[in-house]
Image: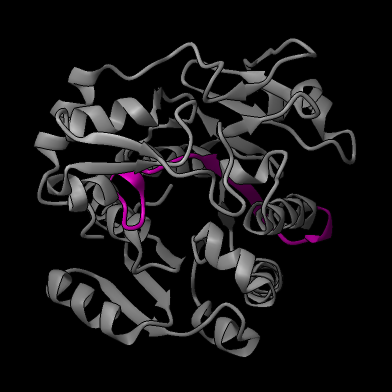
Amino acid sequence: MLKNSTILITGGTGSFGHAFTDLTLKKYNPKKIIIFSRDEMKQWEMAKLYKDAPVRFFIGDVRDRDRLYRALDGVDYVVHAAATKIVPTAEYNPFECIKTNILGGMNVIDACLDNHIKRVVALSTDKASSPINLYGATKLASDKLFVAANSYVGEKNTKFSVVRYGNVMGSRGSVIPFFNSIKNNGILPITDDRMTRFMISLEEGVSLVWKAFDDMEGGEIYVKKIPSMKVTDIARVIAPKAKQEIIGIRPGEKIHEQMIGFEDAPFTYEYDDYFKILPAINEWGKSPERIKNGVKVSDNFTYSSDNNSQWMKDSDLKNWMESNKNKIGVL
């Protein structure tokens, strides 16, 4: 599907954008990948990695509707990865978070509809499921917008879906590079010793987006099956001799991540390596073309990092860190 196509990634200079660009170029040989983002320095640095590749750069902000319309001319597929996503930052700067995550999402939808984009995948987060912080609330609103956008396509062929996943291992601002940066201090701060997190690699995140592009009928939320790990275990693997000091929960922080709440269970179907939450609107949750070969989960089903059936072993994390030591915290 993506072969010989033009793909645009909003927020494309982030961790996901780097991984998606690299892996998609190798697997699908697209006609062109357009990186749409507002940081010229990050674009300049990324451009040096793709001098001879069909990667183009477009300075812009998802808050700027007109700029989006210009960037999407001639594009076939869109990955919407732009977001204000640091939880404490969102708590202290709520208006800015809303402008990017909600109003920016609306701009992406309108621009994609009017430019006849074929398929659009919006990236979501575990924090959008039963949100307790502003970031999660804005991403839940964004998810609802992208699902409902399928009601507005009319005679167009545009389809929208959402991909939801948790903590991306080794990405900038995440727990692994943070612990790595201070492991020699002898003390690692732990907000709560009960805390668990989902663990997903960038490669797994990219493959789920590919799956969504290939599978979607419109309105689905795709959730990857991934392992969990206690934060205290992550700390112990990174710095076995360091003292773990409990410092208390940060503003807006959850003890456990959740990707599917029981409210979504009536519309959730299970597949080999992922779940799919179908839309509750327009009877789409009952449509055979969306369900395909899925198996409906129980009505009291939840998918959270503490009730997960898959747990990452110490050895798995050690092996992953060794294989990715030059990438951790870089992108």
Q: Position of residue 214 (x, y in %)?
A: 50, 39
Decide if residue 37 is in sight here: yes
Q: Residue at x 25, y 50 (%)?
A: 177
Q: Of helix, strand and loop, which mostly describes the magenta segment?
A: loop
Q: Is residue 166 magenta?
A: yes
Position of residue 60 relative to residue 293, above or below, is: below
Nearer to us in this view, 18 or 72: 18
Observer-nearest residue: 188 or 314?
188
Task: Give the answer, above or below, for where 289 lies relative to 207.
Answer: above
State which quadrant residue 127 falls in.
Answer: top right
Specify start and end residues of the magenta stretch as a single range: 151-175
Is residue 127 rendered magenta in the image? Answer: no
Quick check: 228 left or right of 318?
right
- Return the x and y of residue 52 as percentages of the image width and height: 12, 72
Report the residue at 77% width, 14% height from top. 300
Above or below for 222 versus 75: above
**Residue 242 on image: x %, y %:** 19, 35
Residue lying at 67% horizontally and 71% vertically, measured from the top left = 94
Residue, far right: 282
